[in-house]
Every structure is written in C-alpha cells, then in structure tokens.
Amino acid sequence: MSHFKSKYAEELVKNAAYIGTPGKGILACDESIHTMGKRLASINVENVEENRRAFRELVFTTPGALQYLSGAILFEETLYQKTSSGKPFVEVLKEGGVLPGIKVDKGVVELPGTRGELDTEGLDGLAQRCQKYYQEGARFAKWRAVLKIGPNEPSELSIHQAVNGLARYAAICQENGLVPILEPEILADGTHSIGTCSAVTERVLVACYKALNDHKIMLEGTLLKPNMVTPGSQAPKVAPQLAAEYTVRALQRTVPVAVPAILFLSGGHQSEEEATLKLNAMNQLNTRKPWYLSFSCEPFNRAPSRPGLVRRRMSRKHKLLSLPGARLILRQLLAPIRVLPLSLTELPESLHVSNYNLLR
C-alpha cells in the first residue's frame, strides 16, 4: 500500500485526472534533436534550432490544434523555446488548456549480460532537473523503458531493470511535483503471435506495479502509456477488435483501478488509422474498464506526406492564421476517437521501423 506524502499530493492527483479528461489525449513532441534531424531531413529542412522551433510553433499555434489535447510532452529544448512573437511555448499550451510535460529519460543503452536487451539512462541528477522543469511550468514527465520479445526475452534481468527504473523515476517525479507517465514499451519487432505479446505485456505490467508499490508510489498521481497488444511486425495482422480484446484483458489483469487513465502509443509500427481503429474498438467493448482509455500521438507522422506544405508553413513569411492546409493536417491528427469507415484490408501499408527503440 502506498504511503506517499508530499506537499504536491493533491496537485498530482488533480493534474493526472486532468490529463485523463474524456475526449482528449496527449501530444508527444519529445523527439530528440537527432530524431528531429531525421524527420526534418525527410522534408528537406535543415536541422537547426530555428527550424525545430518553427515546426513546434506550427504545431502549437495552428488554430484548433490544441482542441483535443490535455497534455503535450516536450523535449528539454522545447520547454524553453518561444514563438516568433516572444511568447513561451509553455504559456501557449497553458492558454490552450494543455498541460506541458517533459521527457526526462536520456535514451537507452545495451544492458550488459543480455542478448541485446536495453536499459534506460537518466536517473542521475533527475531530482534537480525535475525541480527546474517544475519551475519552468512542466507539470508531468515521461520515462520510456524498452523491452523486446525473443526466444528467451524479455529476460528477468531486463524486466527488473526496466520496472525499477520506472519506479525510481516515478518517486523522484512525485517528490518534485511532476505526474510521472510510465511507458514500459514492448517492441513489435519479430514474428511472435498476439498471444505471446499478451503474455509478455501482462508479465511486465505485473512487475511494474509491484515495483511501484515497493517504492510507495501514489497511483492516483500517475498515468500509464503502454503498447497495444498486437502480433509482431513480421506476423500476419489481426482485426482491430481482436487486438482490442487482448489489450483490454491484459490491462484488466494487471493495472490497478487507482490509475486514472491509460494513453496508448500510436507510433512505431502502426499508422494513426490502425491505432485509432484499435482504440475505438477498446472503448466499444462491453466489459469493465475502470480507467479512461485514450491516445498519445506524434505531430510529425503526417508531415512527410505533405513536405511542401510543412516547409511553407514553417517559413516566417507566412502567417499561421491563414493556413487552412496546416489546420486540416492538425485537425485530422487530433480528431476525437471515432468509428472510422476502414476495414482491415483498407489499412495503409506497414509503418514498422526496425530498431525503433534507438530512434527516439
């Protein structure tokens, strides 16, 4: 049982519940400078701070773009950036009803003693960073642990490292006023079945919440950001309804009712359309779901399909208020979860990126 005591306790519960507002989700704008470089290169834009800032300004200030958001995860650089008129992005988000958050992990390295499994870095100095981020206006944080499925993976060592890292991060965040979002991501790489993914997901989540209990984390002041339960990226796809059933069943067996919301990752190996179909199917299931189920989306996923538009909209010579094309892209991206007129055969080709764990 949690014995968490902090001057921030009421604020943590309030902010976690706000991020879990029905009908809204979170925007993941926490790509590293290296990852943003690759994405800007896909639209022939140079990876310099001004261009990264201009893209963020496009995302945050396009009219209507924040309508379906309750939170936005920022990279450290973005937390301190401003619009071209001098207003801090943090203030833009708050005025739009969006809580600013911050990515606090430092990426992954290979875990010694394993067959290529990974460990997340970033605990050193985390308390001091969280204090600074809170002062700058951040109200939640995100930490990503990465696990993979293989013949003997995930190993007990990998799971132990992942969940204890998440628990230590969560404790530090709550002590310093930030709601911790827990992201134990099980990679889709492989040929494994949906049943295997389900079993591994349950095993990891059980270990995660055991570690959180051991560290006396207040679950009402946390959020979960897991993978959906799906077959491996090289295995045949299954219907969204089946993926929804497996995912919700895994959550029912492992996630305490005290957790206010679960926000699913949409990137990596599936399109927004696929993720939306599955999330919609989860919410339509006639079964007990004590947590709010919603989305975490990335703003850049649609950009490569409209490179000229995005480049023009990032230019200082164009006013964002007169950009119907940009508004359309952002509104499509951030539309509320709904039934889509798509069948499994109509879904886009796979967007799986091998070794996605190393790109974020």
Image (cartoon, rainbow, N blue to C red):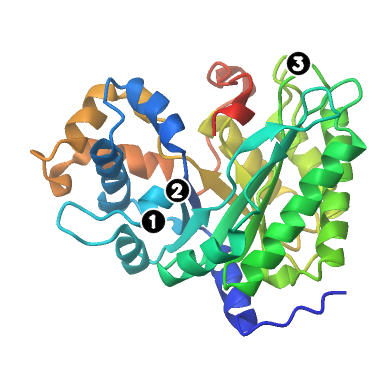
Quarter of the image for residue 29 reads top left
- Neighbor class of circle 2 (other Cα within 10 Å; few <14, some 14-19, many 20+) is some
Q: Nearer the viewer, residue 264 or 88?
A: 88
Please, what is the three-letter code of the amino acid marked with disc 1? Leu
Q: Please determine whether, in this image, residue 215 is positioned above or below residue 309.
A: below
**Residue farthest toward the bottom in the current orientation of the protein:** 7
Q: Please name the residue shown 55% across and 16% down the image.
A: 349
C-alpha span from label 2 to label 1: 7 Å
Q: Please name the residue shown 68% across and 42% down the image.
A: 120
For this view, does 71 lie left or right of residue 356?
left
For the question of whether residue 286 can be seen, the reply is no
Q: Which residue was labeled with disc 3?
A: 235
Q: Which residue was labeled with disc 1?
A: 79
Q: Nearer the viewer, mark 2 or mark 3?
A: 2
Q: Position of residue 308 (x, y in %)?
A: 22, 23
Q: Nearer the viewer, residue 254 or 127?
A: 127
Q: Which residue was labeled with disc 2?
A: 75
Whichever of callouts 3 and 1 sits on the residue coming sooner in the sequence is: 1
- Neighbor class of circle 3 (other Cα within 10 Å; few <14, some 14-19, many 20+) is some
Please, what is the three-letter code of the amino acid marked with disc 3? Ala
Q: Please name the residue shown 65% across and 49% down the image.
A: 225
Q: Position of residue 175 (x, y in %)?
A: 65, 73
Q: Position of residue 12 (x, y in %)?
A: 60, 74
